[in-house]
Image (cartoon, rainbow, N blue to C red):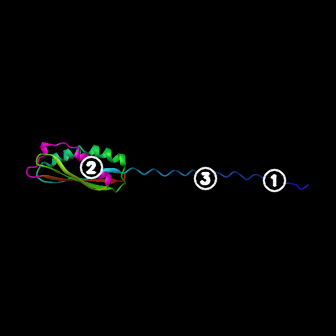
């Protein structure tokens, strides 16, 4: 009868080291640019008022997470009675929508009345890599 030869079992091979999963990308963060203000009124008061919209804009943007590099500018007018009007945005749709919603929610502020005419404001927003 033919003899069956059994080859010795191969030596165990060490498993390759595990490959670390790629780090998740750091979420982009919202940065508020310096507001551009033209017209007669206290620019310090306008900046203080704009600071009150940072939190609602940030909360809105964090729900949608636009990509780093996204940019928008929200423009509006403060009329002679302190009302926020003609709110418009250009650029990234999420940043624009969030900025416009926060500005439209602002209430009339008599302290921001223009000395003459209206005050035009542009608020730049951008997303930077975290």
| Disc nearest the viewer among 1 and 2 | 2
Q: Earlier in the sequence, mark 2 or mark 3?
A: 3
Q: Residues within 10 Å of mark 3 (few under 14, many from 20)?
A: few
- The chief SS type of the magenta part is helix
Label 1 neighbour load within 10 Å: few <14, some 14-19, many 20+: few
Q: Return the residue found at the far right.
A: 1
User: Which comes before the other along the chain, label 1 or label 2?
Assistant: 1
Q: Secondary structure at mark 1?
A: loop
Which residue position is annotated with label 1?
Answer: 6
Q: Which residues are magenta?
A: 93-117
Quadrant containing the N terminus in the rendered view: bottom right
Disc 3 on helix, strand or loop? Answer: loop
Q: Nearer the viewer, mark 2 or mark 3?
A: 2
Q: How far across and down, in percent of the image, does residue 80 sit?
A: 10, 48
Q: Where is residue 92 drawn, in percent x and y? A: 31, 55
- Residue 60: percent from the left, percent from the top? 32, 45
Is residue 111 toward the left or the right of residue 22 in the image?
A: left
The residue lying at 26 percent from left, 47 percent from top is: 101
Name the residue located 55 percent from the left edge and 52 percent from the top edge. 19
Which disc number belongs to residue 14?
none
Tell me whether circle 3 and circle 1 mark residues in contact (CB < 8 Å): no
Of the numbered discs in the image, which one, if any, rests on residue 16? 3
- Residue 116 part of the magenta-drawn span: yes
Q: Earlier in the sequence, mark 3 or mark 1?
A: 1
What is the spatial separation of the Cα atoms under label 2 and label 3, in whole angstroms? 50 Å
Camera-nearest residue between 60 and 47: 60
Q: Give the Cα distance between marks 3 and 1.
A: 28 Å
Q: Secondary structure at mark 2?
A: helix
Residue 99: image tag: 2
Q: Are marks 2 and 3 in contact (CB under 8 Å)?
A: no
């Amino acid at each position: 009868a033919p003899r069956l030869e059994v080859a010795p079992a191969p030596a165990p091979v060490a498993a390759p080291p595990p490959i670390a999963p790629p780090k998740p990308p750091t979420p982009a963060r919202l940065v508020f640019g310096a507001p551009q203000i033209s017209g007669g009124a206290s620019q310090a008061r306008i900046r203080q008022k704009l600071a009150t919209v940072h939190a609602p804009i940030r909360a809105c943007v964090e729900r949608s997470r636009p990509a780093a590099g996204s940019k928008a500018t929200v423009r509006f007018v403060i009329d002679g009675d302190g009302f926020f009007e003609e709110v418009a945005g250009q650029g990234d749709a999420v940043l624009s929508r969030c900025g416009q919603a926060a500005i439209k929610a602002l209430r009339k502020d008599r302290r921001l009345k223009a000395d003459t005419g209206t005050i035009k404001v542009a608020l730049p927003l951008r997303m930077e890599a975290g």
